[in-house]
Image: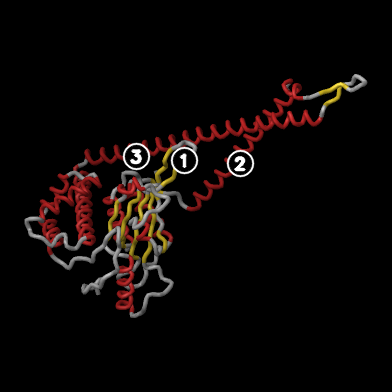
Amino acid sequence: MKTSINFKAVKTDSEVHNFRRKTFDYIRKELTPKNEYWAEDKISERLQKIERYCKERSGRKLQKNAMPIREAVVVIKEDTTIQDLHRLSKRLEEELKIKVFQIAIHKDEGHFNKEVKEWKPNYHAHLVADWQDLETGKILKHQSFHYSKMQDIAAECLEMERGNEGSKRRLEAVEFKIQKKEEELFALNEKINAVKSEISSKKFEDLIVKETDFLGFKKIKTDQTIDNYEKVFKSYNVQLSKNKQELEIKNKLITELRSKNLDLKKEITVLKSRLSTVLSNSNSYLKEKNRYLESVKNTFTKAIEFEKLKNPQIFRTTKDMLPEIVNNICKKISVENRIPFSAFEEIFKNPDNSLHFISLLNFGEPPVNYQSEDIQEPQRRKKQYRPK
């Protein structure tokens, strides 16, 4: 299965759509609970901070035509998790300075294929990102190879195939159109040959209506004969169209199944190769383990930040209540991201991690309230947003 990522200027109704603040006629409401959300800021607040920092850093206002906040729709798999997308976000920030501050996984969009009577889900995620360069205060400037690298990073982090490059995709589109036209021509020739065959057969002799005149000569009754031919041709056209439609549906199903089967085989091959490498090399095993635990730590940190953003009062409680709150957060992200509890036990063993989590739970000014159902008006913070 292939993925792609392409950032564009964020839309004004992005949060309404991404966080499902209202219902839409193109979604399945019963699947909406399967969606997942994460945010560390509202778009309006982040924009204010970007504008303020640009003025402080560069001495100039942000240009009117700038695109300081951008959004990407990323193709994902059914089992893609928030943890996977946090890993992608981290790589984008480390290598391209792109700072993702909102994520929404949508599993309630798609379409119903009437031909095969089956729901075809459109699994995707929305990444909303800050496009400001912290060194200059201005908007990041990327070249074409950066966007190509972006596709590589997405494919690697989500463990999917990289999408085709533009030129190759256009070529494939042209080839596909040629193939379809050739198929249509072949089908048309088949139809013509079938009709010719029927016309030349004796069956059509029965359609000719003749009458004998007063001299004893047989003459064709044109109107009735033409009417008979029209009825027969109409019947044949309906049957041909029905057969063609059934054939197209079957071919389409076969193509989809073959493609899905091929994707699964590739995925299994990659997983087997990775497992073999990890098991046969102690250094690889240690590296893979540390990478995974770092990802778990990052996911847990993001989850705490998001909980504080949604409900600033959640950690303003007695110390006796904190373990239960933390345990509930661990359970939630364990289920959503398929993380074993042993991984949390492992990261808590590290003293540096424990200090990090304690500071996150007990210190620092809590963020403003953020509800996915009701994004409130932004509030000012005393704390500075950008480092000087």
Q: Is residue 207 left or right of residue 67?
A: right
Q: x, y (%) of residue 259? A: 43, 38
Sequence-wise, the earlier of marks 3 and 1 is 1
Q: Residue furthest right?
A: 215
Task: Please tell me whether residue 44 is drawn above or below residue 340 in the rendered image.
Answer: below
Three-letter code, disc 1: Asn
Q: Residue at x 61, y 38 (%)?
A: 184
In front: 214, or 312?
214
Q: x, y (%) of residue 365? A: 17, 68
Three-letter code, disc 2: Lys
Task: Please tell me whether residue 311 is drawn above or below residue 208 in the rendered image.
Answer: below
The local secondary structure at tag 1 comes to: strand
Choose top left, top right, bottom left or bottom right for residue 62.
Answer: bottom left
Sequence-wise, the earlier of marks 1 and 2 is 1
Q: Residue furthest front?
A: 214
Task: From the image, tell me which residue sits under label 3.
Answer: 267
Numbered circle sitting on residue 39: none
Sequence-wise, the earlier of marks 3 and 2 is 2
Q: Residues within 10 Å of mark 1 (few under 14, many from 20)?
A: few
Task: From the image, tell me which residue sits under label 2.
Answer: 181
Three-letter code, disc 3: Glu
Q: Residues within 10 Å of mark 2 (few under 14, many from 20)?
A: few
Q: x, y (%) of residue 52? A: 31, 75
Numbered circle sitting on residue 113: 1
How far apart marks 3 and 2 lie (CA) works out to 34 Å
Disc nearest the viewer among 3 and 2: 2
The local secondary structure at tag 2 comes to: helix
